[in-house]
Amino acid sequence: MTTHPRPPQRILFVCLGNICRSPAAEGVFLHRLAREGLDAHFVVDSAGTGGWHVGKPADSRMRAAAARRGITLPSRARQLDLADLTAFDRILTMDADNLAQVRALASQLGPTPGLARIEPMVRHCRRFQAREVPDPYYGGAEGFEQVLDLLEDACGGLLEELLQSDLRGL
């Protein structure tokens, strides 16, 4: 019996402008995948519900905070698109407003086969208890560190869950 390789899992992280939280989540998750040698098993991206920053790199303060942890944030901001809802397996949102906006967009598709699983990022936190990943944009440097702490925790929990569900599917 031959086994067929599984297609990569497609993960999309979403925040408001796609310059702080979601590119940080993307970078943290990619960093973790590289460390575990799992890069080939995932396609990872990020997007924003708004389009104000399209084409721009992540906020320089977030890039600096991530770099201090050895994490690179490679993405350029883009806006969430209707096609993302079926192109990705999971869409993880940073706060309740983003969750509501993504779900509202999904409702335009109705009961579509292959619709992404849409859920809050903090659902995957193991060490921290948080209701959302707060937007650090208007705060000080400590906000960017707090976001990275939450994202490292949540990305670890997400990867653990994805690997467990992948094992159950074998």
Image (cartoon, rainbow, N blue to C red):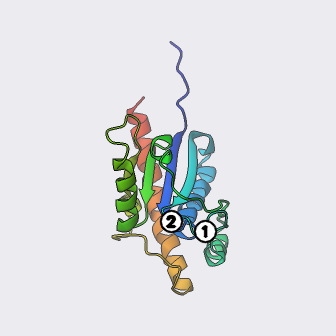
Amino acid type, mark 2? Gly
Residue at the spot x=34%, y=61% of the render? 100
Left or right of 151, for residue 113? left
Instruction: Specify whether residue 117 is in view.
Output: yes
Q: Residue furthest bottom?
A: 140
Q: Quadrant of the C terminus?
A: top left
Residue at the spot x=44%, y=61% of the render? 154
| CB atoms of marks 2 and 1 within 8 Å | yes
Residue 120 got which mark?
none
Residue 50 got which mark?
2
Disc 1 crowd rating (10 Å Cα; few below 14, some 14-19, many 20+) is: some
Locate residue 44, reporting x and y percent. Answer: 57, 50
Left or right of 13, for residue 129? left
Q: Residue furthest top?
A: 1
Locate residue 117, reporting x and y percent. Answer: 38, 46
In the foreground, 110 or 15: 110
Label 1 belongs to which residue? Answer: 53
Locate residue 71, reporting x and y percent. Answer: 64, 65
Q: Report, in whole angstroms, how far the alpha carbon at label 2 lies from the one at label 1.
A: 8 Å
Amino acid type, mark 1? His
Residue at the spot x=41%, y=36% of the render? 114
Left or right of 102, for residue 37? right
Instruction: Specify whether residue 125 is in view.
Output: no
- Under circle 1, the secondary element is loop
